[in-house]
Amino acid sequence: MALKRNWYTIYAAAFLLASAAQSLAAPIVEGMPPRALTDPKSIVSRPLPGAAPVPIADLFFTRGGIDDAIWIPHANAVAITTNLTGRFNLWTVPADGGFPFQLTQSDDRQFGMTASPDGKWIAFQSDKGGTDVYDLYATPAAGGAVVDLTNTPDVDEEDGVFSPDGSLLAFTRRPKAESAVNIAVMEFATRQVRQLALCLTSSYSAPLREAGSWLALPP
């Protein structure tokens, strides 16, 4: 009886091997099998009874607003601040189009960007907890850890702008307890800050403009 079962097993195995050999010997068809093209006019949307027309504004709606935007030198990209995820953080977008890449994450608003001339760094300003006392920060344009450049909880620093060689960062500086706004310059490599001028106005908020070794201040 055991011998008879063994013969059945051998016959079954031989049959499976023969079937596999026939499958392997069959010609292989490369590419997708031919099929008829779909007539575009035959495609229709399923009607939804009671549906109202779509408002024109909804057709142009984009999630998230853009608060700031700058070109990144030598990177073929634009840096923006947008609340795409609910908070105004820094993102980069390819200049030839594409989905943005998030550079920073914070619950606090980040804006006031300036890019280093070599395109490697983006400096920006942000406060903590809505205090309106801003620090200056920097992040690699290619992505990486955010650096707090000033880290002064009682001093407001805003409107940063790089020098043409990228070695200096000029900005406005105002102690929280004072009304006068100062102009200061930071050595970007060492974070050393020196004060240059006193503007004597609490309403000064226009950004600085660099030109060679000079800073142009709006009247």
Image (cartoon, rainbow, N blue to C red):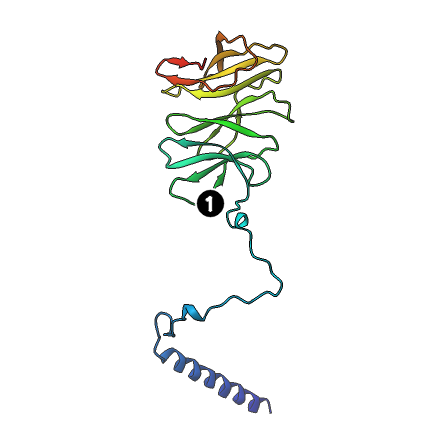
Between residue 20 and residue 122, name the one nearer to us. 122
Between residue 73 and residue 2, name the one nearer to us. 73
Where residue 56 sits: x, y (%)? Answer: 52, 50
**Residue at the image point whose x is 55% and y is 54% from the top:** 54
Where residue 96 sits: x, y (%)? Answer: 38, 43
Total residue callouts: 1
Type of the residue with mark 1: Phe
* Label 1 Cα neighbours within 10 Å, binned few <14 / some 14-19 / many ≥20: few
Between residue 43 and residue 141, name the one nearer to us. 43
Q: For the C terminus, which image quadrant?
A: top left
Per the image, label 1 sits on a secondary structure element best described as loop
**Residue at the image point whose x is 36% and y is 17% from the top:** 211
* Res. 131 in view: yes
Where residue 134 sits: x, y (%)? Answer: 57, 21
**Residue at the image point whose x is 48% and y is 10% from the top:** 194
Where residue 200 sits: x, y (%)? Answer: 54, 8
Vertical placement of residue 82 versus 131, above or below: below
Residue holding disc 1: 99
Q: For the N terminus, which image quadrant?
A: bottom right
Vertical placement of residue 144 versus 164, above or below: below
* Res. 168 in view: no
**Residue at the image point whose x is 34% and y is 71% from the top:** 30
